[in-house]
Image (spheres, grey):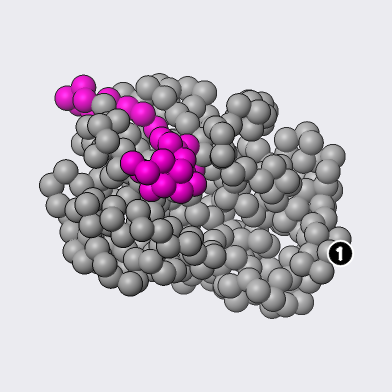
């Protein structure tokens, strides 16, 4: 019996979690399993365990953290090329970009390194990016021309969301009609969609109405978890079209298929969308399906590495 058999991750005994130094009482079902999976991945490769600072200020060993030495060597990234890319992206990041370098380098459970692991190779090879995204959005993407991490068209600009909202990744592309377009990516890994909500701003309400994205732009649910981050990012994507930066675009959420809290949020968010002509469409793709697209694009070694790091829970199954 396995995760594939049941279609969901198991509840893992606390004893097992403590044995691998991944017990956290605040973890939900998926986050607990993903934390253990990352610890087992680290153990298999004999990477030294790292520490993190607790809310009380004490240092605690945690199985999904890499030691300082392993982190400095780039162990959190699936290739040396991506590790080098990360160093450059951090050094040349956009003004106002929020990149937690400690989590990026050392926390194997963080969505920060996952973003670079999934999309770093696509920035390094635009041909691979084109072949991959043609599968993800064949009606929109003909050629990828640029890839940008932690990207906003203009932070704190009143023509957009007038805040610091940014996409994890943005792909600039041409459509089959050779019009300018984009794919905006938000990647969730073990998140529960319950992050601290943004302070509500008048521009959000205004843009919610002007965007044409929503059946009821005033609906309170859009302003609360688990939808508020999707609401803000989809509006930012729409504002890029409204301001003439692109002719069209798509906002895509990338997440594990077994992270039920994220998948449930996707279903709920879709219910609010008006699907009006000219709207920046919302879509979602799982880690597994994105990995398959990368494999079909010809990067089989990359796809295998991504599957092993993020999609293969066999080692977790073996402990149940």
Q: Main secondary structure of the magenta part?
A: loop
Using residue 59 as the reference point, say whether residue 157 is left or right of it: left
Give the quarter of the figure containing the C terminus.
bottom right
> In the rendering, at what x and y percent does residue 3 appear?
52, 66
**Residue 274 appears in the rendering:** yes
Question: From which residue to which does the magenta span run?
Answer: 151-179
Q: Quadrant of residue 98?
A: top right
> Which residue corresponds to mark 1?
58
Question: Observer-nearest residue: 166 or 85?
Answer: 166
Using residue 157 as the reference point, say whether residue 92 is left or right of it: right
Q: Residue at the location (83% across, 47% down)?
A: 67
Give the quarter of the figure containing the N terminus.
bottom right
From this view, report whether residue 225 is shown above or below residue 83.
Answer: below
| Residue 170 magenta-highlighted | yes
From this view, report whether residue 193 is shown above or below residue 180.
Answer: below
From this view, report whether residue 292 is shown above or below residue 267.
Answer: above
> In the rendering, at what x and y percent does residue 125 appear?
47, 22
> In the rendering, at what x and y percent does residue 142 appear?
26, 26
**Residue 19 appears in the rendering:** no
Q: Residue at the location (79% across, 36% down)?
A: 72
> In the rendering, at what x and y percent does residue 139 appear?
21, 36
Q: Residue at the location (80% across, 40% down)?
A: 70
Query: Number of numbered discs present?
Result: 1
């Amino acid at each position: 019996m396995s995760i594939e058999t049941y279609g969901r991750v198991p509840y893992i005994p606390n004893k097992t979690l403590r044995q691998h130094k991944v017990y956290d009482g605040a973890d939900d079902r998926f986050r607990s399993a993903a934390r253990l999976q990352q610890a087992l991945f680290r153990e298999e490769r004999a990477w030294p365990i790292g520490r993190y600072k607790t809310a009380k200020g004490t240092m605690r060993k945690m199985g999904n953290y890499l030691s300082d030495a392993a982190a400095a060597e780039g162990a959190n990234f699936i290739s040396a090329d991506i590790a080098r890319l990360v160093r450059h992206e951090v050094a040349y990041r956009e003004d106002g970009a929020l990149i937690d370098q400690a989590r990026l380098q050392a926390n194997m459970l963080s969505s920060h390194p996952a973003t670079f692991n999934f999309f770093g190779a696509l920035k390094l090879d635009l041909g691979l990016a084109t072949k991959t995204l043609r599968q993800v959005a064949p009606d929109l993407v003909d050629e990828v021309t640029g890839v940008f991490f932690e990207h906003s068209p203009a932070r704190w600009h009143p023509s957009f969301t007038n805040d610091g909202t940014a996409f994890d990744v943005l792909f600039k592309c041409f459509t089959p009609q050779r019009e300018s377009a984009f794919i905006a990516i938000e990647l969730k890994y073990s998140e529960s969609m319950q992050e601290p909500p943004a302070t509500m701003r008048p521009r959000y309400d205004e843009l919610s109405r002007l965007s044409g994205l929503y059946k009821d732009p005033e609906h309170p649910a859009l302003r609360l978890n688990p939808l508020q981050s999707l609401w803000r990012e989809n509006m930012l994507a729409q504002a890029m079209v409204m301001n003439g930066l692109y002719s069209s675009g798509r906002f895509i959420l990338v997440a594990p298929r077994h992270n039920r809290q994220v998948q449930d949020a996707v279903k709920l968010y879709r219910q609010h969308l008006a699907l009006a002509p000219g709207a920046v469409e919302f879509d979602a793709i799982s880690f597994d399906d994105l990995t398959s697209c990368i494999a079909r694009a010809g990067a089989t070694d990359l796809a295998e590495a991504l599957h092993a790091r993020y999609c293969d829970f066999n080692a977790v199954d073996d402990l149940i």
